Image (spheres, helix red, strand yellow):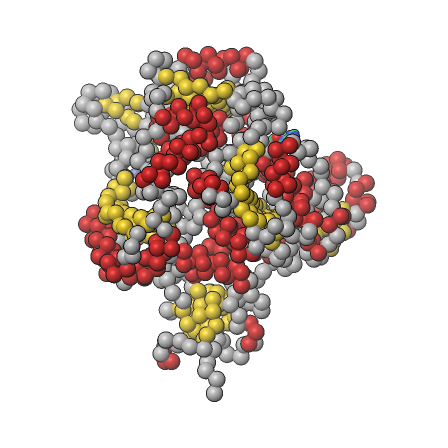
Amino acid sequence: MNSPTVLRVALATPLKRLFDYLPPQAVAEHTLTPGCRVRVPFGRGKRIGLIADVSDHTDVPAERLRRATAVLDTEPLLDPYLLALLRWAADYYQYPLGEVVATALPAALRRGQDLATPSLRWCCTPEGRQADPEKLGRRAPVQARILDAARRMPDGIGPEDLDPPAPNWRNAVKSLQEKGLLSAREGSILTQDADARAAKAGPQLNPAQCEAAQAIEADAGYRCYLLEGVTGSGKTEVYLHAIAAQLAAGRQSLVLVPEIGLTPQLVQRFRERLGVPVAVLHSGLADGERLRSWTAAARGEAGVVIGTRSAVFTPLCKPGLFIVDEEHDTSLKQQDGFRYSARDLLVWRARQLNVSVILGSATPALESLENAHSGRYMHLHLPERPGAAEPPTVKLVDLRRYPAPDGLSQPLLAAVRRHLDADGQVLIYLNRRGYAPVLLCGGCGYVAECRRCDARMVLHRHRSKLVCHHCGAERPAPSHCPECAHAMHPVGQGTERLQHALQEQFPDEALLRIDRDTTRRRGELAAQLERFRRGEARLLLGTQMLTKGHDFPALTLVGVIDADQGLFGTDFRASERLAQSFVQVAGRAGRADRAGEVLIQTASPEHPLLTTLVRDGYTAFAERALAERREAGWPPFGFLALLRAEAARREAAFEFLDAALTAAGPYLVSGVTLLGPAPAPMERRQGRFRAQLLVQARQRPALQAFLQPWRLALEDLPTGRRARWSLDVDPVELY
Ligand code: ADP
Ligand code: ZN
């Protein structure tokens, strides 16, 4: 007799192991394949999981081995490569495979829904080309929009190209077909004649772009390129060239961008220039849209996939090229749950599939620079902006000489005036929302603090509230001190207060403020940015949200209000982050044919970080920072993992970490050290006490060799039940 087949199933549970089941009764043998979904009994309920493995052996005693109730797929949803990627990620980031699978699959598939039906694509017929769009648009605006999109796409459009999709688009497509303006066709675009595509031509590449584009060979196999180019230097044009070369060879490209960089303009640019369907994947999609994009990628109906972090797991039927834009951006690392780095996983995936990957940035991560120095990555440079005369001039304003009681120093005000008079636009950067970060009693020095966090409450005057930016707690703002009844004073600036100050100085100028408070509604951020781009306002004030990827041709002055808030950070990465955001925000100035100017207000103008950055630029700063990291053994010259714990009682968090420290004993290998446990830099947050234990290793393999058995041992610690804990491999923040 044959031994029974056992399905090893990945289920989304906190346990880092697989679950064994017998196959359902009367099931076709070929569907019992890794990558297919199964429905299984679990506890008293039912769950959907993924077959990770099929074995003829199990340690579960026969009487406890249960039977799966159904196999949901006739073919694997995930191919062996993708499955191997997920497995590797689960091992590397010490996270349960079932949870990793759950991150990779669209919600609709996790719930057991079928793949989207092969989507038809609709091509414009010759009659459709002749039709008068205005006439159509008056009576049927959705039809007009769809027809217009189809006209620009010789390969036809699919549902994933309707961005955003109108609720009644199916009817509109049907009407267009009935009128003979659209025709439907089925199948992968990648198997069709590439010459049929008529994409809109882009600008002629300049010599540096040409050199980069030529270096990126279409058939080189695995290579990693670090494309370092100042903001606006035309990196996207280089991506477009490389992607076009892949399309010509019938292959797909996958592009990862930071959440905030994925704008409709960017997607539009890709669609027009490449002339193929582009599938978009981001967290704001409805489940159905996400499933359609995912399916279009898997079936080869989309030539390009653009997405945020989790798009790294998108199945592709003919992968040719991977790209990570703004590769330094921290949003590429998930900060809770399955804490993976999408950039690092994409590089791994490229190597696995033997395709190339481009990492692009104006301010590369120090890790990536070090990989370029060591020769692992090929370093490509775009040193200047096409057309633009000069890079912006950057100057420091010494706040000790020029006080700025309401946030605006005389030199900055004068510069704003000068640029407005010369018909330029001005961006003021302050990475702190609200009215004032501190509400202080003038009598006794009492400061309003959060009751649940070790943090000060931020005054939001417009709403007359104190708000904690860490836990979201709110309470009415007191006008008088609860201790001594003196009047309370706001101290320091947030964007709300600065808006008043600017408006007072420039009463006749329209001003836009962009921060989380002013852009809560969906689409509001894009709308505001578009208004500024169109010149409806010449003054723009905002936070971190402004530092990424936006192109403002008429912007000539950038003012940084407060350089000091990040200069003395506790995290070893604080200075890298600060330098990146300065350079990114400064890069907004003078993009077209006007020279830009950047003024940075600071009370520490002799700080080496600032002086290096201003005098010698990001590259010099990075060299210096890398030398410091090498000295200290910090990444990329060492490797870290952070075990975090939090609990309602301080002792519970520490008891767990102490036990974790003891449990580490048998597994400690040479070159691995544990530091702590120690309280987190902000110990109390949302009423819970937080502490951490840092694992530091000289080599990655040693770190991994230690983490594997240790992570399993942690699951068994009784103290782990009284604290919430997580393990973060390659953390980007140390708190
Ligand atoms: P990046 O991705 O580096 O920020 P983009 O590719 O978006 O830069 O280019 C910035 C701007 O310069 C865009 O408006 C783009 O159309 C334009 N541009 C890029 N390359 C060229 C070129 N070779 N000639 C003319 N304009 C160009
Ligand atoms: Zn709080």
- Counting from the top left corner in percent of width and height, residue 310 is at 49, 50
Ligand 1 image-quadrant field: top right
- 140 lies above or below 171: above
Question: Depth check: 667 or 660 in front?
Answer: 667
> Does residue 637 appear anywhere in the picture?
yes
The residue at 46%/12% (across/down) is 414
The residue at 38%/28% (across/down) is 609
> Does residue 714 appear anywhere in the picture?
no
Question: Depth check: 35 or 40 in front?
Answer: 35
- Counting from the top left corner in percent of width and height, residue 494 is at 38, 26
- Counting from the top left corner in percent of width and height, residue 161 is at 64, 46
Q: Quadrant of residue 244?
A: top right
Position of 365 compared to 638: left or right?
right
Question: Depth check: 448 or 219 in front?
Answer: 219
The residue at 25%/47% (across/down) is 675
- Counting from the top left corner in percent of width and height, residue 482 is at 21, 28
Residue at the front extreme of this rendering: 374
